[in-house]
């Protein structure tokens, strides 16, 4: 094919509605099926992935042909966590309006790096920034950057903190780098999320230099165990322990940490959203006193992947830390999104966040978040009644359970995953094996929880049989 033949072919297919109609139809069928499909691919589906293992194709094929292959061999090997019985990691479903916004905006293909590149993206990023400050009750001067997730938001927060802490010491880290810079102290609880530790090493602070603070039985920092802080300290707190769901006691910690001059970061990947819920808001009391916050939308807010936000009280620190310049950059009168994120180009996740918030409203969001806690409590009660031991205080949406012995817990988890009625992962808690449940999807019903508990019981019977047999 010549260049112009390829171009003609692409024009024809680009404007052929039936291609997208097919994609939508297949997607829609997937969605309806996903609600009751087994939550993990079966062995045949996994084996079929070999079909993708081919040399780079020689010639141009058709749009429908490519879509067909993706659907036929790819779809069966997806993990349908949009349904109600996926309890692994901390994985949300999709708010309907948010999915439709993703579909529509896929055609727009907007890049909100600069206002001039996407006035709509810029406008909505500003609107949602204001909404988020209201939802989380954060100070007016805070700014938000829209990133891929909490890992990235933590990275941006630490960059802003590093910039400001060193600047206060008379050191410009952008110009001088870290060699011979004044030493920054990093203070963190022993149960900090692994992505915080990754951020610490990426920033050049060194894991060895972390001053670890002891935690209580739920993984919360013990306020009295925090060392004396100072202007050179970054203190890392957590709203929602990834295992127990526990929250650090911000009202006991933040005021004094602020008075001592420390930069406080709160990792609230899924937990910060309890601020949106009247019956759970007490868990985050005092969190407004921090300097930066990292939070996911693809978890508790149930937007599609990927979506996270860095929120920073110190606008100048965030922008200067992530700053870039170039002769071709056009500064808008409104918001140029790239000043608040590490990337220049990125997709306009904002359409999905805006749609989810616009759709739910204050009441809908409150109810959705409250529902996660209700389902977690239902799990706690039904699992306890079935003879499992729940080992954490179920303050929000995480439930940790175990059997009498570690061996039985591990075997039971293996059987749960084989039965594929629900999916959950394992973890360790107080040096013992646990099964870890996270309720984070609007689509989880009471019936889903009961079905899952029944599967736990079946799995334990199979596991006990295999251990005695
Ligand atoms: C999920 C999670 C992260 C990492 O977030 P990503 O969006 O996966 O990058 C960090 N901290 C906590 C507490 C989490 O639950």
Image (cartoon, rainbow, N blue to C red):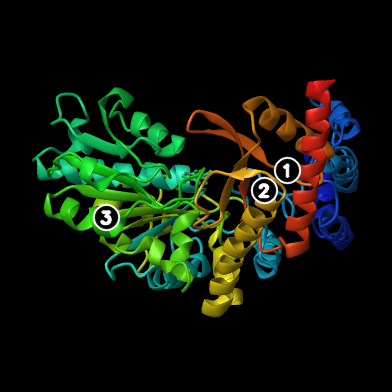
**Upstream in the sequence, badge 3 or badge 2?**
2
Residue found at x 64% / y 29% = 405
Nearer to us of marks 3 and 2 is: 2
Closer to the camera in the image, 132 or 171: 132
Q: Residue at x 47, y 33 (%)?
A: 430
Is 275 on the left or on the right of 404, as rendered? left
Q: Residue at x 73, y 43 (%)?
A: 423
Instruction: Give the residue number, with chain letter if any, for mark 3.
Output: 291
Q: Does residue 134 appear left or right of residue 224 in this picture?
A: right
Q: Residue at x 53, y 57 (%)?
A: 297
Q: Which mark is on residue 423?
A: 1
Evaluate whether residue 83 shows in this view.
Answer: no
- Judge depth for marks 3 and 1 and give the one in front: 1
Local crowd size for mark 3, using a 10 Å CA cut-off: few (<14), some (14–19), many (≥20): many
Number of other residues with Cα within 10 Å of mark 1, as a class: few under 14, some 14 to 19, many 20 or more: many
How far apart marks 3 and 1 lie (CA) works out to 36 Å
Q: Quadrant of the N terminus?
A: top right
Q: Position of residue 45 (x, y in %)?
A: 87, 34
Q: CA distance from mark 3 to mark 2?
A: 32 Å
Q: Are marks 3 and 2 in contact (CB under 8 Å)?
A: no
User: Does any portion of residue 101 appear in the rendered image?
Assistant: yes
* Quadrant occupied by the C terminus: top right
Q: Are marks 2 and 1 in contact (CB under 8 Å)?
A: yes
* Mark 2 lies on residue: 87
């Amino acid at each position: 094919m010549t260049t112009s033949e390829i171009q003609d072919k692409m024009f024809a297919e680009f404007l052929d509605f039936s291609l997208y109609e097919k994609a939508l139809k297949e997607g829609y069928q997937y969605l309806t099926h996903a609600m009751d499909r087994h939550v993990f691919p079966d062995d045949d589906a996994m084996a079929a992935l070999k079909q993708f293992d081919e040399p780079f194709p020689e010639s141009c094929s058709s749009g429908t042909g490519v879509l067909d292959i993706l659907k036929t061999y790819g779809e069966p090997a997806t993990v349908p966590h949009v349904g109600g019985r996926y309890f692994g990691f901390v994985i949300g479903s999709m708010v309907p309006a948010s999915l439709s916004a993703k579909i529509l905006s896929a055609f727009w293909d907007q890049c909100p790096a600069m206002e001039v590149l996407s006035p709509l993206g810029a406008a909505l990023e500003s609107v949602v920034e204001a909404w988020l400050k209201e939802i989380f009750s954060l100070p007016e001067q805070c700014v938000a950057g829209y990133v891929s997730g909490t890992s990235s938001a933590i990275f941006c927060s630490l960059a802003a903190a590093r910039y400001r802490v060193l600047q206060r010491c008379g050191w410009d880290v952008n110009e001088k780098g870290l060699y011979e810079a004044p030493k920054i102290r990093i203070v963190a609880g022993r149960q900090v999320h692994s992505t915080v530790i990754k951020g610490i090493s990426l920033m050049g602070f060194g894991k060895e230099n972390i001053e670890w603070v002891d935690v209580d039985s739920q993984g919360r920092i013990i306020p009295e165990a925090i060392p004396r802080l100072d202007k050179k300290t970054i203190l890392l707190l957590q709203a929602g322990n990834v295992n127990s769901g526990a929250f650090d006691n911000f009202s006991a910690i933040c005021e004094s940490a602020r008075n001592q001059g420390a930069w406080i970061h709160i990792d609230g990947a899924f937990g910060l959203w309890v601020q949106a819920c009247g019956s759970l808001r007490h868990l985050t009391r005092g969190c407004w006193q921090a300097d930066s916050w990292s939070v996911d939308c693809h978890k508790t807010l149930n937007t599609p992947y990927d979506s996270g936000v860095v929120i920073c009280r110190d606008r100048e620190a965030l922008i200067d830390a992530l700053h870039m310049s170039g002769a071709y950059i056009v500064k808008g009168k409104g918001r140029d999104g790239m000043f608040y994120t590490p990337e220049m180009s990125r997709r306009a996740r904002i359409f999905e966040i805006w749609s989810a918030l616009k759709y739910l409203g204050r009441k809908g969001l409150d109810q959705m978040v409250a529902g996660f806690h209700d389902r977690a409590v239902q799990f706690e009660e039904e699992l306890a009644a079935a003879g499992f031991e729940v080992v954490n205080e179920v303050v929000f949406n995480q439930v940790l359970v175990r059997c009498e012995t570690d061996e039985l817990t591990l075997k039971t988890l293996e059987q749960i995953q084989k039965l594929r009625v629900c999916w959950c992962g394992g973890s360790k808690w107080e040096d013992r094996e646990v099964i870890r449940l996270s309720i984070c999807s609007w689509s989880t019903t009471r019936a889903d929880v009961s079905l899952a508990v029944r599967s736990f019981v079946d799995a334990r019977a199979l596991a006990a049989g295999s251990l005695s047999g």
